Image (cartoon, rainbow, N blue to C red):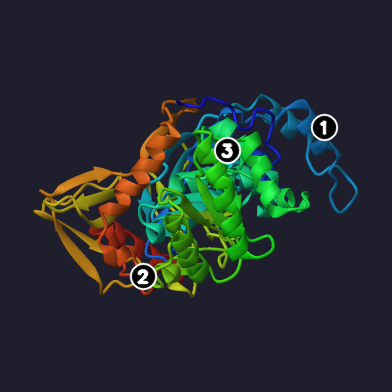
Amino acid sequence: MKITKDIYAGSLSLLTDLYQITMAYGYWKSGNMDKEAVFNLFFRKNPFQSGFTVACGLEYVIDYLKNFKFREDDLAYLETLEGNDGQPLFETGFLDYLRTMEFSCDIDAVAEGSIVFPHEPLIRVKGSLIQGQLIETPLLNIINFQSLIATKSARIRQAAGNQTVLEFGLRRAQGIDGGLAASRAAYIGGASGTSNVMAGKIFGIPVKGTHAHSWVMSFEDELEAFKVYAESMPNNCIFLVDTYDTITGIKRAIEAGKILKEKGYKMVGIRLDSGDLAYFSNQARKLLDQAGFQETVIVASNDLDENIITSLKMQDADIDVWGIGTKLVTAYDQPALGGVYKVTAIRQNPENQWEYKMKLSEQAIKISNPGILQMRRFYDEDGSAIGDMIYDTEIPESTNKYYQIIDPLDHTRSKKINKNVTQRELLTSIFKKGKLVYESPNIEVMKTHCQQELQTFHRGIRRFINPHQYPVGLEKNLHQLKTDLILTLRKK
């Protein structure tokens, strides 16, 4: 079932950095606000030393842009801001301009759940210079965080294989919105469900959960706690067995499970939340099987991530369900994706030619790619992805029988791809002149898309340690344009 709710129904136009508004004021003041500009949102490095990234957050972006408007209380606040001289920071005329401004940009983006790589544009914004500038911060805020969490979740899903992965991280998440966005992104990346009930309501994610240690501790006896819970909720019994002594707790859960079985119900599982998870899961499996509970699953939690899951599997741990909290919703060991948003082309009006823009740096990785960019992915006869090409939609394609893509960071590395192979464009039209033309798929479709896309890439790209670098390059003519522009700018 598709959930159709506005995530952000109120005004969030001030969810931005002040310099975005001061630059917008400068564009207005100098008469440059209506120049046409192209901005591209991209990142420079995969997170977690991974070989890939999962694009996520587009539906939030759509909700934000549908409601993008400066309202009276926003303008009243901006009117109170002062410059260093104590005078108003913004003229009344500028605030009047913001009052009547309607979002009118073209937005193209990759679908949520898509596998993407450094330097590839995840979102392309084309429209007035002032509007492209004003939406920079919220787009980065949304895409950076959700793509980060979705990537972490996809890695955890790979480690868990076909086993159930539950996201348990709300209490450790970065605030209310961080918790909601993390639950959503984790599900798209590969989690099977969440403990976050509000995320279940808003996004249609399956919700899971039974009881915590406090339930057991509220009774005089652990067995009594299990029995009372079984009486209260016989169709949702996963007993947490490590409140006092894990082995004893497993045995008491089995006693409660026998009572459930006599009443026609079943003990779904037990949960281990501390100690040597490999050892205790082995002992638990042995005790459960001996007591006739072969179908009872063993759930493990306790600061798990993809690396610990991999280690536990190598130790032959008998764990069926993985409860992942802190290290998933906080993207443990990488606090941010590091996405950036750069202007790549400007023109005075549609009758003029584009003037290409790029940021220079002493670091090659920080030199941006100019142009009105699009991406194309190529596949071999087996359906495996073999390379991505970043190209400029305004530059005519060569007449050669192949494409040549050149590494943005090393011009000595290039790859030729036959033009006859299967290929598809990655950026899809989302808004046209401010009007939404895209229908977001159901979250289940996004989740399935992510897993299917991952399988099109060689396992070397998906491995955790020293992953293979997937070929992403600039189309030959775009690379030449970039080189010429660098040489020109270096002379200034």
Q: Earlier in the sequence, mark 1 or mark 2?
A: 1
In the image, residue 104 sits, relative to residue 458, either above or below, namely above
- Front residue of this view, candidates 216 and 189: 216
Coordinates of residue 423 in the picture (x, y in percent): 20, 46
Amino acid found under the numbered disc labelled 1: Ala
Which quadrant of the rendered structure holds the N terminus? top left
Q: Secondary structure at mark 2?
A: loop
- Residue 131 numbered tag: 3
Q: Distance from label 3 to label 2 (Cα)?
A: 31 Å
* Label 2 Cα crowd, 10 Å radius (few <14 / some 14-19 / many 20+): some
* Label 3 crowd (10 A; few <14 / some 14-19 / many >=20): many
Residue drawn at x 59%, y 40% is 130
Residue marked by disc 1: 76
Residue 434 screen position, x and y as percent: 50, 28
Residue drawn where x is 58% and y is 36% of the image: 234
Horizontally, is 433 left or right of 133 in the view?
Answer: left
The answer to whether marks 3 and 1 mark residues whose Cβ atoms lie closer than 8 Å is no
In the figure, 253 relative to 459: above or below? above
Residue corresponding to mark 2: 409
Sequence-first disc among 3 and 1? 1
> Is residue 41 in view?
no
Q: Secondary structure at mark 3?
A: helix
Crowding at dot 1, Cα within 10 Å, few <14 / some 14-19 / many 20+, comes out as few
Find residue 120 and report its horizontal and vertical position in percent.
Answer: 38, 55
Residue 78 seen: yes
- How far from the left and from the top, in percent, is residue 477? 25, 57
Q: Is residue 32 left or right of residue 77?
A: left
Residue at the outermost front position: 262
Q: Is residue 61 above or below residue 371?
A: above
Q: Nearer the viewer, residue 181 or 236?
A: 236
Labels 1 and 2 touching (C-beta < 8 A): no
Tell me which label, 3 or 2, sits earlier in the chain. 3
